[in-house]
Structures are given as C-alpha cells and as structure tokens.
Amino acid sequence: MTLLVRNSLACLLLLGLLWGFIVTSDPYLSLGSPFTAQLLNLLFPAAILFLVWSLIGRMAIGLLIAVLLVTVFHYAGKVKAEFLGESLVYADFSVVSSIVESPELVIGFVPLTFTVFLFAFLLTLILVSYFLSGVAKSSGLLRAFVALVGSGLLVFVGSYRAPSIIPDLGWEAFQQSGGAAKVGIIGNVLLGKMTQESIEIVPDIAMAEQFWAEPRVIAARTSLERLSVRLDFRPDIVMVQSESLFMPGKLCGMPETPVLPNISSLGSPRGGELEVPVFGGRTLQSEFESLSGVPISAFPHSMFAYYDLLKKNITAIPRVLAEQGYNTVAIHPNKGGFWNRNTAMGRLGFQTFLDINAFLSDRDESIRGHVSDLSLVKAVLSQLDSANGPTFVEAITMDNHGPWGAATGNTSESLPVPDMLNPEAAKIFTDYLARARDADSAYGYLIDALRRRERPTLVVFFGDHMPALPSVYKSLCFKNGLKPEEQLPPYRFWSNFSTIDLPEKTSSYLIPGLVFRSASLPMPDFFLANAVMGVVQADSEISAEEKLKIKQQYEQLSILNMTTGAEIDSSVRTIISRPEKIADTLKRFHVGGAAFSSDSVVKLDSDMQFSTFRGAGGVRKISIRSYLDRAMLSSCAEHEVTDQAAAGISVKGGGREIYRAPMQRGAFRLATFSTAGLKDFKFEAYGLGENCPSVNIKIVQLQCDSPQCEQRQEDVDLSFEVEPRFHRDFFAGDLKSLKELYPEGASSSSGRREALDWLLGRVVYEEIGYGPFRVHPDHQIFMHPSESVSAKMKVDVSGSKSLTLTPRIDPLAAHCRVLNEPGREAGLVGLTIKLDGKNVFEGAIDRKFNELVTLSTESHQLLEIIVDKGNEVSWCDWFSVGVDRVNS
C-alpha cells in the first residue's frame, strides 16, 4: 500500500470518528439529518484537527483536541438552551471580552461536573502525549499535507458568504436563536458567521411615511397634541432597570399575599406588565429598547444591540433630555466594559456613566458579592441632591443577577418557598426570593426618599427580563397557565405630581413615549411616533392585525432613525476612571494641601485641611465619592449629637462653593459637578474633631476635553505646568499671553476657544436661568433664560481694549417648531449688555441674528450679559454667546 493511500485512509478514518462523535453528541443531529447540516458541523472541528496534527505531528492529539472543542461547543449550546431558551449563535462570540472581564456572571451557571470533566479530559490529553513521546511523529510531508487541508477548510469557513435564508435546511439568519434545531449547534454558529455580510437592513421610506397617514395614527396624534406641554416644568426622572425581576406570586404554590409589597402596591393605572425582547438574560436588549424606543424586532439579526446596532450616536431619551437642559447620568455597579456600556452610554447621549468604581466593596456590597440595590438607589439620590438642574438618572441594578443558590446567609424562614420544590431548586428559589425582596425594599426606600423631596420627580421601574430558573419552572407552573417564556416582568411609574394613566400591558420599546408624556415634556418627531405607537398598542378597539401593520410601519421609522443617527458631538470627551490614571492626572495640577494616593483617594484629617488644584487643563467635570472610615462611624455619630456640627466636605472653585456635603453616619455621598471654566478648585474638610478626625474623598471619574488631561505626569510638557497659558493668573498674565499668541486678536476656531477661555476665567458672577451654563463644541456658552429667571453673567474686563461677542440662537428642532404660536414664537430672547452698569447693547436676538457685537472695554472694569425670555416665551430659546476676539 502506497504512502499516499495510507495517509488518505488515516485522514478519512479520523474524519469518520470525528463525524460520528459530532452527530451522536449533538442533541439536534442524527444520521438522518440532512447531509449538508452534518457537513456544516464537521467543517470547523476538522480544520482544527488537521491544523493541530500538522503542528504537533500526532493525529491522536489532533483528534482529542477537536473532540474537546466539539464538547465545549455542545455543552455551551445545551446550557444556553436550558437557561435562556435560545441556541448558541455566532454573535455570542462578540461578547467574549465581556465574559472574560466578568467571568463570575457566567461561570456560576456551569455545574461542577462539567468542570471535573474538562480537567479529566486535559489530564487524558497529557497522559496520551506522554505515552506517545517515544513514538515517531508524522512525516514532514504528511504534516504539510494535513496543514494544507486544515488551512483550506479554515479559509473556506472564514470567507464563504452564505445567503441569509437556506430553504433546504429551513434555516434563516433572522431566526438564529432557534437555528440549532435545524442545523445543529456548531452548524448554527457557522452559518451565523457565513451570513453576517449578507444581512443588510435598510429602511422602507414609503412604508415609514405611511405610518403618519394611518387613520389610527392620525387620531392618536391629534389626541396627544391636545395635551399641553408644561413649558417650564422639568421634573427629575429616575429610571430603574431591575435585574431579572418578576412577580414571584405568579407561580403556583405561592401565596396570594404580595411577595413584593412595595412594587405590588403600585399597580394599574400606574403600571402593569412589560413585554421585553429577551428571556433569562441579555439585559442590554431590553435596556436598548427602553432608552431608544427602537424595537429589536426591527433588527431581527441583532443579538447584542450595543455591539451590532449602536454604531453611532442616536436619538434616545438621554440625548433628547440633555438637549432640553437635563443632566443625564447612568449608574451601573459592574465593570463599565461589560456589554460595551463604556461606549454605548455615550452614543445614547448620557453625559456621565458611573460604573463599579463609584462604589466601595466594604460597605456597598450585599452578602452576594454584588453592590446592593439599596446602595445603588442611595447613589441615585445622591446624584439628584448634588445636581444643579433637572436630572435624568438611569440605574441598572446588579444584585439579583444569576446564578442563584450559591449565596450564604439566606434563610427560607420568612420566604414563601413552596414545598413541592426539590432541595436544590428550593435553595435556588430561596436565594432568588431573598434578592427580589431586597430589590423591592430598595424600591420602597427610593420612593419614600423622593416623597420627602420638594423637586417634582418621575420614577420608572421595570424588570429587564424573566430570571433563568429552569429547575424551579420544571416543578412549579404559572397561575395564568402560560409557559415561562411567555411570562412578563412588571413595570411601574411613580410621580409626586399628577400625570397620565398607563396601560396594564406595554412593551419596553414604548417606554420613551410614556416617559415624555408623563413628564409633559416636548418630544422630537421620533418619540412623538413612539408615543403614538403606545396609544395604538393600548387601544383595545384596534384589531391585532391592524396593530401589527402599524407596528411594522413604526419599525421602518425606527430603522430610519438608526440609519440617520443623531448629530455628532464635535467636542472631544475623554473619560478617565481608572484610579491610577486619575491619580496621575491630578498630580499634574496639585498645588497645595493633602495629596491623592495612587487609588485616587485623599484623606483630610484635620479641620479645614484642604487639597488644591490649579490649571486643570481640560478637566470639565468631576465625580467624587466622599466617605468616613468604617472604624470612625460610631465615633462620628457621637460627634453629631454633641454641640459640634457634623463633619463634612466642601468643594470650592472660582470663588464660590460648588458642592457641600455633611458626612453623617450612614450618609451616601456620590456627586458629579462641572469644573468647566474654573481656574482652580479645592477640596476642603470642615467640622472635624477628636471624635471624628478625618474624611476621605475618592475621585471616581474625570471628564476631559484636552489632550493634556490624559497624559501621564512624566509625559507632560513642563512648560505647561510652570507657565500655564490662561489658568494661573487670569487678572494679570492672561491678556499678555493672548496677545503674544494672537497679536491681531483671536478670530480662528482655536483662537475663539482661547478667547472664550479668557472670558470664562474672568467670570465673577453668574445666575443660572433655564439650565447650567455649558460650553458648546462651537465655543459658545449656553446661557438660556427660564420662565421667571434671566440668565446673567458678570465678567472682569479690566486691562482689555475691546471685545467682540457672537450672540446666537440655535436652529429650532422639529419638536420646538410645533410649539410656535403667532406672536409667541419660540427662538427669541432679549439681550442686554452693560459696561460698568450702563447699557451698551439692548435688543432682541432671534434665529436670523448673525452679527458681531464689538464693545470698547478700555477703561471699563465690569461687563454684564443679561438674557431674558424676550417675548414672554421661554421654550426652545437656545441662546449662546461666544467671543470672536479680544484686543488688549
């Protein structure tokens, strides 16, 4: 027998063995399955077999590793199907980095038996390698041949482009979540890879336009437009996305008495059940829908929206609210990279995203090892208390994340665990109930705290999906007779002001419209469509067929919205959240007092001790967590009941106090504040004494818009530190520096920024109207008047000769245009400019105003800019002013 024949037979034998193992171990395959499906499952393992054989020179090792690979694939597919009711898909591999970052969220679902099997298999592999060590390896020619075969198979798998629908196999790319039943576990993954470039979702413009022409839509839109938008009413909005929460009382064997009393006490018409796009996991799908108003059904190929859909900035709740003057904050007590949230939150429009770094493990975590829901809602309340304007906070809970059953300290004594559960299922369900009770208690704490606040506030609370409890569902039915996959988590709205009634059942993608309607806020066109869709969906007189048709039209609007995206923010925003990098950054600007440690914490251990920073480059916003040492909690509590005031911290900058927080026992202090335009800022302790000798301040996050901000200390140009351009002595050296840089004044884009920095550095007084002053990407200061308060700014202009200002009104968005009334049009303000108390400019500024206002400031000291509502209308008058040039 020739060598070629022997080698060919050896290859065929190995392929046959591997083929047989794949078909018999895959629960969806058999020898009677379509030949193409069986072949699909063989391609990738065969490529690995041949490549390992060629590298090591031993066919047995190649076969064992290929078998191990198949086993891992099949087991992963089995676990996902058991807990989530879905097939393993190619898109699952896009989130491997998230799993590596937080393996504890996945490993717990893998039983010990499989771990033991893996170790046993690896041991077998080592033993086989040892016993074969004395046996000659395959010849170089054979290894070259199998390397060629393996490489060819791998290239084919990686480059072949399959159609999105394969009728002969009954497989569709848009139905991959159940595709393993058609083509096997590995075949489903492989086809997902081969079809990813065949999927292209484009909007049907005609169908999208038909949405607005539907009689039902016209009627719903008319009814919504009759509702008045409350122009100067901007409540705080809190959205709590509760991990894996459902109402346990829906299970057979559970008592009729509410298991979750706080959530149960607020039902219809303030909430009901929520249709979500996932079961058992993939939180990000429900999260994406609830923030964007885009139904996942419009993109049926999407398995992980933050990876495969969110490629650009889009219209979403946080972005629209930010445009209306809101602070927008997302808080999630997990690693920020999980589910790609570090990128996704910015694309949704959140100005601030705080992750696990904002929390302290020794005091914020529950017995489960996650940050408790109570700590999270305290963080929400702290953000609201520290805000200088209306605020939207999205809180994504973590403590009820599976797997369940491993936590110690839970007891079933006070929990209604049905007797028909076996011991293992009872242990799992006890753990789940304990966590759900904690979530309910945290929700009650949040509502009680908000009731005591004077600020109008809207709370949205919902479960992101049903929990993955297969052992419980096998033993307990549901009282409504539906399958676990058909059950719906709860949703609730709460407010301390009167608002709309809500449907008993809605969908997570319809939450944006309900939020804007409940808060009486103006809506852009897409969210108006979302609100209309919500009205249609809740109308019991509309048939299911007609609702489906209108939803399909709305889906095309959603695709159009995603394709168009939102306006790109041209400003550069760098987020620094790693403690060591924060510490490196702050060292560059530290000029006195206590220094920060490498973990970005400063301890202030004497009354009035401070830590001062000057010339902090592009640092625009800071988030801090202040706290007492655990050992001092009791003594500080005693300190409070004496005649001494409670200890606390103060943050000052630009000659005013930015933030102040007493540090009572049990207080949770997490604040975010702006440092834009400040020439310095200082952290200071007060009220310390013998019983309460110190407080700690942890810098959680820096937001920067300067390249200098993210460089390490040793990499920074020392001339910047020794002689900063505009951030050391604004009242002496800044004009000289500006004149050296721009002898003829500042008129270029970079010059406008330098000139604006000059102006901001000389601000001596400001009075906020509609919302906090902020700098736009085009180097204009946003200063919008409110219904009753003008926006004012006073600037020291001594030493300058002239100043050229650029007052502007931003173009009106579509949702602003619909508010216009004859004689009361939006987009107009009254502007008054004074020098040393005398008017030098007075007039109306509208959208057509495009002039420069040049002022002679020589021999003058105080410039005042006053912006009022002009025509008794305050909505959408997005006024800003910039500095075109400064001459000295």
Image (cartoon, rainbow, N blue to C red):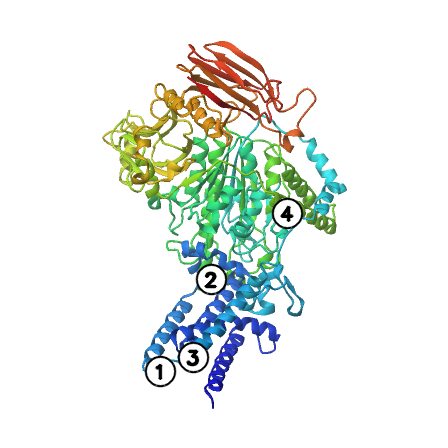
Badge 3 element: helix
CA gap, disc 3 and disc 2: 57 Å
In terms of sequence position, does the residue under pointer 4 or pointer 2 come before the other?
2
The front one of 625 and 417 is: 625
In terms of sequence position, does the residue under pointer 1 or pointer 4 come before the other?
1
The front one of 353 and 80 is: 353
> Which mark's residue is nearer the viewer, 4 or 2?
4
Quadrant containing the C terminus in the rendered view: top left
In terms of sequence position, does the residue under pointer 3 or pointer 4 come before the other?
3
Q: Which mark is residue 136?
A: 1
Q: Amino acid at mark 4?
A: Ile
Badge 1 element: loop
**In the image, residue 360 lies at what x, y percent?**
35, 43
Q: Indicate whether 512 appears above or below 231.
A: below
Whether residue 474 is visible, yes or no, is no
Q: Indicate whether 246 appears above or below 24.
A: above
Q: Which mark is residue 425?
A: 2
CA gap, disc 1 and disc 3: 14 Å
Residue at image coords 68%, 35%: 224
Res. 609 image quadrant: top left
Q: Kindly indicate whether the residue at mark 4 contacts the one at mark 3 (C-beta within 8 angstroms).
A: no
Res. 233 image quadrant: top right
Q: Looking at this rendering, what residue extends furthest in the right direction?
A: 215
Badge 2 element: helix
Q: Which mark is residue 559?
A: 4
**In the image, residue 819 lies at what x, y percent?**
66, 28
In terms of sequence position, does the residue under pointer 3 or pointer 2 come before the other?
3
